[in-house]
Image: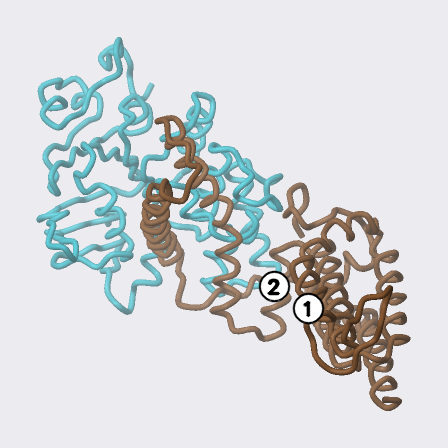
Chain colours: A brown, B cyan
Amino acid sequence: MGTGHAHALFLHEHSKIHYLAPEAKLAAGFLFVVAAAITPREAVWAFLLYLAALIALIRIAKLRFSFLAARLTVIIPFILFAVFLPFVSSGERIEVLGIGISLEGAWAAWNVFAKASIGASVSIVLAATTELPDLIRGMERLRVPAVMTAIAGFMIRYLELIADELGRMRVAMTARGYDPRWIWQAKPIAASAGAMFIRSYERGERVYDAMLSRGYQGSMPDLGHKRASHSDWRTAITLPLLGIIISVVALRIS
Amino acid sequence: MTPALRVSDLSYSYPDGYAALSGVDLKIETGQRVALLGPNGAGKTTLALQLNGVKEPDSGTVTGGNLALAEATIGEIRRRVGLVFQDANDQLFMPTVGEDVAFGPANLDLKGDELHARVAEALLAVGATELEHRAPHHLSGGERRRVAIAGVLAMRPDMLVLDEPSSGLDPAGRRELISLLQGLPITQIVITHDLPLALELCDRTIIMDAGQLVAEGLTAEILQDSELLHQHRLELPFGFDPSVIHSKP
């Protein structure tokens, strides 16, 4: 579904991964990340295998590695946190380049780095190959409560609209000479956030009225979209299956 | 013949006590297009929300065709009386145009091919077939308005209530809208500040002020009564003379 326009994280392509049903992709991605997360951190070979699986996945999805790398920058704050661990942790110490670091801390840092990268990479591939409405639909099929998927759906639909409104308020402030640089100039921003809240609340009421007037009875109607076929599930299951095998072997060995 | 819509002695106050409607009586004949004019805050939108039971009146009744609005009939009344909201963004809440148009009929328990046929029919009626897979946010104002109308038409209503349909449209978009509404063989109430549009579309006009109906008559006559228009904060565009234009050939 959905041609022409898409969200910022989506990359229009025709790949096997793009065409998989969203619920199969979501479930597969989630299981793979769980498998990676429970893998013991000392099993470095397992993480190399995960990396290989991810590279294969990216190739099949016809995504560029540079695209993925650019998106991966979101995990930098977590990595920064992890970088300090070897220096501040206690326990057995080893010497690297003349600097004493904690072995326990180094493993902890590696653990954060490896698992965060895998989790983020899978999410990025998922977002790049699935349009937002499909993701929401996938969640619905996976029995995520309807209230949550409805809220997520409305948030996506109205986020841009609210951002536009916020932008216009900002322009209106600038047009009348407001140029905030310091924290004590923040009052108008706080006031505009309040105004924004009221406006969004009122819009919410109007949207609800519009829903009622087209026969809404408390739950979103079934619009009969195509569901995941057996072959979708078979294809999608490959990745988590691999992950689970690797993770089980790693757990056994340790 | 039963009128398409009948409203008797309808009153409504907002929770803060402000009386938005007091004792409104209204009768719309089947097949008619009626303009509802009035200044800001006259209660036009509030009245529209009463007509298919989105807001519940304090007193009075609404009857759509032969069916009085009540708890048991509200679903059917909502199908019969289609509301097109003032801000199309309020009405287009689904991720794609096709899903939005499907929302109403799906609530009527249409499924599968039948549902899809209904969506296609409604989009075709407003000339928006090619917009089916687009996101509402990326449409132009005119396209958004037409799609919003499609979302209501998909429920195959007996009448349309349009709240300021021409507001925010450019002249070409306004023209397309007028042609579209002229071509729809269905009863319509058009709430508007656009007096030339009222003259072009509607034989009959009702003026509302301070929650009451204050005047009713042929559009061509009402628009020539400058005293009446002035009393209710209405004004014809500069240079516009309704007497030289006939609303219908």
Neighbours of disc 1 within 10 Å: few (<14), some (14-19), many (20+)? many
- Residue A23, disc: 1
What residue do we see at 83% from left, 49% from top? Answer: A64
Query: Which residue is at 51% across, 33% downward?
Result: B140
Marks 2 and 1, how far apart at CA: 8 Å
| Mark toward the start of the polypeptide (2 vs 1) | 1
Image quarter of residue A168: top left
The total number of labels drawn is: 2
Circle 2 chain: A
Q: Amino acid at mark 1?
A: Glu
Residue type pointed to by label 2:
Arg
* Label 2 close to label 1 by CB (< 8 Å): yes
Q: Quadrant of residue A224?
A: bottom right
In the displayed structure, B220 sits above or below A197; it is above
In-front residue for pair A114/B177? A114
Figure quadrant of the C terminus of chain A: bottom right
Numbered badge on residue A137: 2
Q: Position of residue B89 (x, y in %)?
A: 43, 44
Establish whether labels 2 and 1 are both on one chain.
Answer: yes
The x, y position of residue A38, in whole percent, is: 75, 81
Q: Classify A204 as above or below A141.
A: above
Whether residue B47 is situated above or below residue A39 in the rendered picture:
above
